[in-house]
Image (cartoon, grey):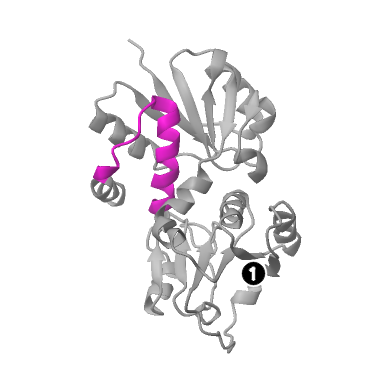
């Protein structure tokens, strides 16, 4: 007997926590469906989507590295904010099973910042470390929330290209990632009424990747440290931020937030977020 299912695709994919998240919610809601992980290479994208589109049990997929831009030519439509961001992380069969792509990373990233964003500020600034697919979603989300952005990348032209894609509501800045590696004696002004973020939106610091070198003398007093890396969950970046007295947000916050948006599209029901503490315990066991 078959049942409805959704999945996450990418290459590699075995490390993904998405199946555990969606299966947890499906069980809590008593929905007879499944969520899987499927390894799909760049060369296999077209065949994969054609096969899944023809499967009436398939409810859609989340898309991870390196496919967020590769899938777009094979979709019937790309919705906002994916169009502006230039990256798709969620695909679902819409009317007549035509494939639609969207992006839930932006909403997922903003979710744990909701209380901060509801307050008025004289000025908002975010230092974003990285300029890849996840950084694009984060930068577009923050630009719409009236942040001035400093985008730091190992390749300066990549940071500049990202800035050029943003809605020009304010002036943004591109710098080399090395800029933040050395200690600074910059004297920050009074941050009362300001909102400052320092975000690792790169794979640096992830298990098996190069370390992220960031000196916390570059962070204004009261800045919030946000790392989207989920393995390990307690990164050196967050540990050093906490030791320097900063509030921290870990990668599970964004991962669960973006999954919640996708779950609604796949299974037609909001996930039971009252169980987030239990879900976090499951994911970190």
In this rendering, position of residue 35 left or right of residue 46: left
- Pinpoint residue 5: horizontal percent, then vertical percent: 40, 22
Residue under the point 62% across and 41% down = 87
The residue lying toward the viewer, choosing from 164 and 16, is 164
In this rendering, position of residue 140 left or right of residue 205: right
The question of residue 269 being in magenta is answered with yes
Q: Quarter of the image containing the N terminus?
A: top left
Q: Is residue 52 above or below residue 228?
A: above
Which residues, given as a range, are shown in magenta? 252-275
**Residue at the far top in the pictured view:** 1
Q: Main secondary structure of the magenta part?
A: helix
Total tally of numbered discs in the picture = 1
Q: Quadrant of residue 241?
A: bottom left
- Pinpoint residue 113: horizontal percent, then vertical percent: 43, 58
The question of residue 218 being in magenta is answered with no
Residue under the point 30% across and 52% down = 284
Q: Is residue 99 above or below residue 2?
A: below
The residue lying toward the viewer, choosing from 262 and 195, is 195
Secondary structure at numbered mark 1 = helix
Residue under the point 40% across and 33% down = 263
Q: Quadrant of residue 10?
A: top right
Q: Residues within 10 Å of mark 1 (few under 14, many from 20)?
A: many
Residue 124 seen from this side: yes
Residue under the point 71% across and 58% down = 163
Q: Which residue is mark 1?
A: 177
Residue 75 seen from this side: no
- Pinpoint residue 198: horizontal percent, then vertical percent: 52, 68
- Pinpoint residue 54: horizontal percent, then vertical percent: 54, 12
Q: Quadrant of residue 243?
A: bottom left
In this rendering, position of residue 67 left or right of residue 284: right
């Amino acid at each position: 007997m078959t049942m409805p299912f959704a999945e996450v695709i990418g290459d590699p994919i075995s490390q993904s926590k998405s199946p555990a998240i969606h299966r947890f919610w499906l069980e809590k809601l008593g929905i007879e469906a499944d969520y899987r992980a499927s390894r799909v290479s760049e060369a296999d994208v077209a065949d994969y989507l054609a096969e899944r589109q023809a499967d009436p049990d398939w409810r859609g997929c989340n898309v991870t590295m390196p496919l967020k831009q590769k899938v777009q030519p094979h979709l019937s439509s790309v919705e906002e904010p994916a169009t502006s961001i230039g990256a798709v992380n969620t695909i679902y069969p819409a009317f007549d099973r035509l494939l639609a792509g969207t992006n839930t990373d932006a909403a997922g990233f903003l979710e744990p910042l909701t209380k901060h964003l509801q307050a008025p500020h004289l000025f908002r600034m975010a230092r974003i470390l990285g300029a890849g697919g996840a950084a694009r979603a984060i930068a577009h989300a923050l630009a719409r929330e009236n942040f001035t952005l400093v985008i730091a990348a190992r390749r300066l032209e990549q940071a500049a290209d990202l800035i050029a894609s943003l809605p020009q509501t304010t002036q943004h800045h591109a710098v080399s990632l090395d800029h933040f590696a050395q200690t600074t004696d910059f004297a920050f002004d009074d941050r009362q009424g300001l909102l400052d973020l320092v975000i690792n939106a790169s794979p640096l610091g992830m298990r098996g990747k190069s370390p992220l070198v960031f000196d916390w003398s570059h962070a204004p007093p009261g800045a919030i440290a946000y790392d989207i890396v989920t393995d390990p969950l307690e990164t050196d970046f967050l540990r050093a931020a906490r030791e320097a007295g900063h509030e921290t947000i870990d990668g599970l916050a964004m991962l669960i937030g973006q999954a919640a948006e996708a779950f609604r599209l796949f299974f037609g029901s909001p996930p039971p977020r009252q169980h987030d503490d239990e879900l976090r315990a499951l994911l970190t066991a």
